[in-house]
Image (cartoon, grey):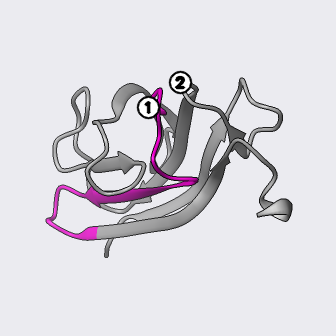
Amino acid sequence: MAPYISSVSLSNNAGPSQWIARAGSTLTLSFSVRDDAELADGTPPAGFLVSVGPPGSGPTTYESASSINFLTISRSFSYSWRVPTLPTFTRVGYFISVLDGAGNVRTMSAEGAVHLGRSPDLA
């Protein structure tokens, strides 16, 4: 069975709201993974591919992992990404790919999870 990705959050702690960022802001991507097979260990975990921003953006930085429930294989992960000083885009999304010990893969992505510089209601 493929891993299950949940509780995904891409947010900004320094903007006018968590969903609005400014040039130079650091965004945090947090998510949980539950599985019936062993999840990869490591910092970052082998078999995980995580990116934030439009295609061609700089790499994300692995921040942390923690166990959520010791009775199941369930962990929480955190990555960060810095918005360029002079961005050429107005929306930021993410891509997550998780590989478990049995070789099963699950992916999740979103576009426009965070907007740059103004409220998405005004776009």
Amino acid type, mark 2: Gly
Amino acid type, mark 1: Pro
Q: Is residue 13 magenta?
A: no
Please give left or right for residue 95 compared with residue 66 in the image: left
**Few, some or many residues within 10 Å of mark 2 (<14, 14–19, 20+):** some
Q: Which mark is residue 24?
A: 2
Magenta part of the chain: 78-105
- Farthest residue in the bottom direction? 1
Q: Tell me residue 64's x, y (percent).
A: 43, 25
SS at circle 2: loop
Q: Quadrant of residue 41?
A: top left
Residue at label 1?
84
Camera-side residue of 66 and 122:
122
Instruction: Please tell me which residue is depicted at 25% across the width and 26% down the height of the picture.
Output: 43
Q: CA distance from mark 2 to mark 1?
A: 5 Å
Camera-side residue of 90 and 70:
90
Camera-side residue of 55 and 113:
55
Instruction: Please tell me which residue is depicted at 25% across the width and 68% down the height of the picture.
Output: 105
From the image, which quarter does the N terminus lie in?
Answer: bottom left
Instruction: Please tell me which residue is depicted at 32% across the width and 72% down the height of the picture.
Output: 2
Count every numbered label the image shows and give the total: 2
From the image, which quarter does the C terminus lie in?
Answer: bottom right
SS at circle 1: loop
Q: Tell me residue 21's x, y (percent).
A: 66, 37
Instruction: Please tell me which residue is depicted at 30% across the width and 60% down the height of the picture.
Output: 97
Camera-side residue of 29 and 123:
123
Q: Do the residues bearing badges 2 and 1 touch, measured as CB atoms within 8 Å?
A: yes
Q: Tell me residue 15's x, y (percent).
A: 75, 30
Residue 45, relative to residue 94: is it above or below? above
